[in-house]
Amino acid sequence: MLPSAPDGSPLTAVLGPTNTGKTHRAVERMLVHDSGMIGLPLRLLAREVYDRVTRRLGEAEVALVTGEERRVPPRPRYWVSTVEAMPVEREVDFLAVDEIQLATHPERGHVFTDRLLNARGRLETWFMGADTMRPVLQQLLPTIRIAGHPRLSKLGCRGASSLAALKPRSAVVAFSAPRVYDLAERLRVRRGGAAVVLGALSPRARNQQVALYESGEVDYMVATDAIGMGLNMDVRHVAFADLAKFDGHETRPLEAAELAQIAGRAGRYLDDGSFGTLSPLPPLDERLTRAIEMHHFPVVRRLIWRNSDLDLASVDALSASLSQRPRSGLLRLVERTEDHSALVALGSRPEIRRRAQGRDAVKLLWDVCRIPDFRQLLFDHHVELLGELFQQLSGPGGQLDPDFVAERVERIDDMQGDIETLMMRMAFVRTWTYVSHRESWLDDARHWQERTRSIEDRLSDALHQRLVARFVDDTQKTAQPRARPRGRRPPESPEPDQRRPEGPFAQLFDLRQKMRDPLPAAGPGDDWLEELVEAPHERFSLDADGRILDGDLTLGRMIRGADLLRPEVTLTLDDAIGSGARSRIQRRLVAWTRDLVSSTLAPLRSEDVTRLSASGRGLVYQLEQNLGTVETAQARAQLATLSPDDRRLLGQVGVRLGKRLVYVRRLLEPSAVRSRVALCSAWLGLHTRITLPPAGAESLPAQRDLDAAAHLAIGYPRFGPRAIRADTAERVARKLHHAARRGVFQLPDGLAARFECNDSDLCAVIEAFGYRRVKDGQFAARGGPHPRRRGRRRKRPGGTTPSPDARTD
């Protein structure tokens, strides 16, 4: 009997080898929906996808959730997460899980299996992974639709290579940190250096090492199998230095599918890649080579499973429910898990068992047991820490003692030591980062989140510096020239007598000096880069020409993108900054522009808008596309069918429905107008410079080289020779309409002074509002009464003639 699975959305499995674009397709599909969630196998990969999505949408609409990192804006539409940390209790339209073949992993597999059986999106659900999962998916989920995609590039075997013969842009793969360090040392001596990528690195340290490689500062990378899970890097050849790994219990040979997953990192998109072994290992067996090249592997028959319907009545009941066996032959009970082992160990202690009485206490104990053992010390040490945490949390206050936490965190806040020492401290701080994100456990959780993140960032920077100092020798010439990305010139060394300029160019000069030499300046340059890409929204500013500023330093400029609301960014920083650093800065700035648009249009994206009728939402859409102002005539169809509730909700979000214009009052404030001008400038290009209205200005001269649509988009629609702020234009339109009801009317006093124009221009403005001049100072509606000429009388029907004083209106 198969386990039950929830009814609901159509199920799709996207299967195939590496470099088929599975993750990319899933992300694109997710963004088609109004909301979505994607689970990824690694924290590093989750961060990479988060960066990609925020580059398109901004950080206000995307949440990142991993065990040690939570970036959750007030109202995210999309969730990027590790598979274990997926907030599956939230309903989203689209849900996806990547690398679903990890459902066979002896320790983590049960989590992937649980997502496969129980996690669903409201409208659509995707699972991505290896084609070896096809039979078991078809048996477990008979209604699933399976889509297969071929690899985009070829993958071929090159036999065995020595370090001396290893071609540039190669990744050497080993399966332990000491082995990785040894290989990186040898590459430093022979080839000038290597970047190092380990699964235990933080995203910040990993990004710094990858940037070193991607920018061409080094041509080689030494990594563990962490690079096998979808991390995108410019690798042309993968060389296996080991073909066996310690999996936590024993050293075993890698299976063919595992080797293929790692080898598949070679060659990205349409560029072919190769794989092989590193001498003195012999070349791979011919049958194994053929299997990797042709992507033919034994199919998966059974998945690792653990019951997720837990009994929290008691510690024993919880342990028994975790040990429950599956009812399907397609599933196999997980043999051992860290959290269950911790529960058994703590449950055997009388003092813990006394406190773990009742559902809430048992649930708390289980939550504590699920804290990962990032430190990987003796298991008893991990259990001791968990026991101490549970006793504090189950005590009278129900929270951790801040002095207890502070003492342990302060021990880690030390940037001294070698690579191994810093790596150990980074593992320790990950434990406390995980704890700090359980907000009910700490009195001031936000403080501890910021504190542990700050420590991790500084440890990451210090670790990166140690890695560069130990494994990169920039003074030694490599046997072959380094393959830098196309279009990049090597950074030139500054002249010895080059002096630091004064004024706004001083900061740019300092930045260039920091980023030129990756060795002596690696610390300061990386500090600046990391602070920049992690900076809050408020650090950056924007001028009316679309330049993005960090203080006095111009980082980039917004340029024309897919539409008015999605500009792209071109960097204006010096070319001496490496391509990896430039890519990260550009991603941050593009994400910032998306957040700029979201914050500017925030009134139109409130929860009240979701309750509007189709007509109301259509009007809001027009306002968004025009940055907050539309002509009433353009929205006549939507306005005519608005309900009273629509009008009330629109009023609550600040939409004013005028006779001449529909506009959002908050988007006429000076800061919003500046953003609107900058977005229009980016869309129109450098050949058209838009004049920024002075703060509070009600009118300014219309630009001859700017069309009516652009004037409307910046909130100052054009009326003849003047551009008038939308709210002022609407008030004037109402006054003129009211005056015109009496026929011929005099212009209100002070109108010329208010518009800062002469009488001739004022007449042209009034005519642009739809009125005609009757005589000096007098106007009437078009189609209204004409002036009477002296000496001529109109005859009434029947031949009578009215007196000159008779009313004609």
Image (cartoon, helix red, strand yellow):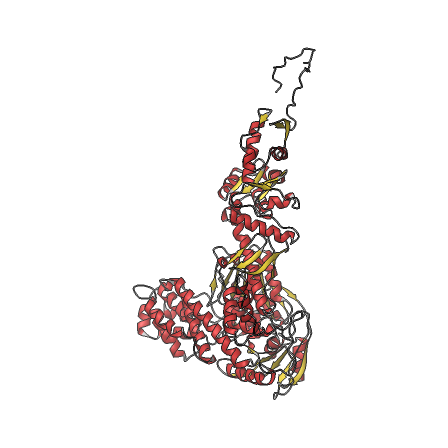
Instruction: Report the residue at 52% width, 52% height from top.
Output: 599
Instruction: Report the residue at 61% width, 50% height from top.
Output: 680
Instruction: Report the residue at 63% width, 88% height from top.
Output: 282
In the rendered view, would you say 80 is above or below 275? above
Total marks shown come to: 0
**Residue furthest to the bottom:** 280
Instruction: Report the residue at 37% width, 64% height from top.
Output: 441
* Quadrant of the rendered image containing residue 227: bottom right
Query: Residue 611 at what x, y percent from top left?
Result: 52, 45
In the rendered view, would you say 699 is above or below 750? below
Front residue of 147/396: it is: 396
Query: Seen in the image, is 609 located left or right of residue 450?
Result: right
Question: Which quadrant would the C terminus be assigned to in this image?
Answer: top right
In the rendered view, would you say 6 is above or below 738? below
* Quadrant of the rendered image containing residue 635: top right
Front residue of 297/394: it is: 394
Query: Residue 723 at what x, y percent from top left?
Result: 60, 41
Query: Residue 222 at what x, y percent from top left?
Result: 57, 79
* Quadrant of the rendered image containing residue 140: bottom right
Query: Residue 209 at what x, y percent from top left?
Result: 55, 74
Q: Is residue 175 visible?
A: no
Q: Is residue 439 visible?
A: yes
